[in-house]
Amino acid sequence: MNADNPRRQFLTRLGIGALVATGAAALAACGKGGGPVACADPTGGTKAQRDALKYVDVAIDPAKKCVTCAQYVPGDGCGTCKIFNNSPVAPGGSCDSFAKKT
Ligand code: SF4
């Protein structure tokens, strides 16, 4: 095989680019890259409560993030929220029941 084949070089670069993009997306999804973290209730049992309190994974007001809320319990990636039956919430998330940690 010819290593100087332009088509081969293109396909190799395309494959490396796809791997880099996939890795970056995986890191962002688990919060290791500093990006937003998506945290859902695996049981779905708090969906109605989350909807009623307008929970979002990315706080609209940066001063009202879950990580600074009294109801937040830190975790690895996602934390948990006491009022959502201790189900996962994003550190950068928020809802209408935000109460600043003192
Ligand atoms: S109560 Fe606090 S920790 Fe729970 S979802 Fe709302 S802002 Fe986040």
Image: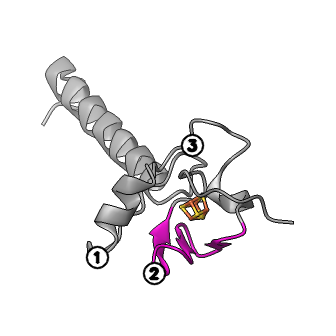
Tell me which numbered mark, 1 or 3, is placed earlier along the sequence: 1
Report which residue position mark 3 lands on. Answer: 59
Residue 85 tag number: 2
> Alpha carbon of mark 2 to alpha carbon of mark 1: how far?
9 Å
* Nearer to us: label 1 or label 3: 1
The residue at the point 46 percent across, 73 percent down is: 84
Q: Is residue 72 one of those drawn in magenta?
A: yes
> What amino acid type should be assigned to the residue bearing mark 3?
Ala
Residue 91 x %, y %: 60, 59
* Amino acid marked by disc 1: Gly
Ligand 1 neighbours mark 3 (CB distance < 8 Å): yes
Q: How many marks?
A: 3
Spatial separation of the CA atoms under disc 2 and disc 3: 20 Å
100 up-or-down from 15: above or below: below
- Residue 45 drawn at (x, y percent): 28, 76
Circles 2 and 1, Cβ within 8 Å, touching? The answer is yes
- Which circle's residue, 2 or 1, is located before the other in the chain? 1
Q: Which residues are magenta?
A: 70-89
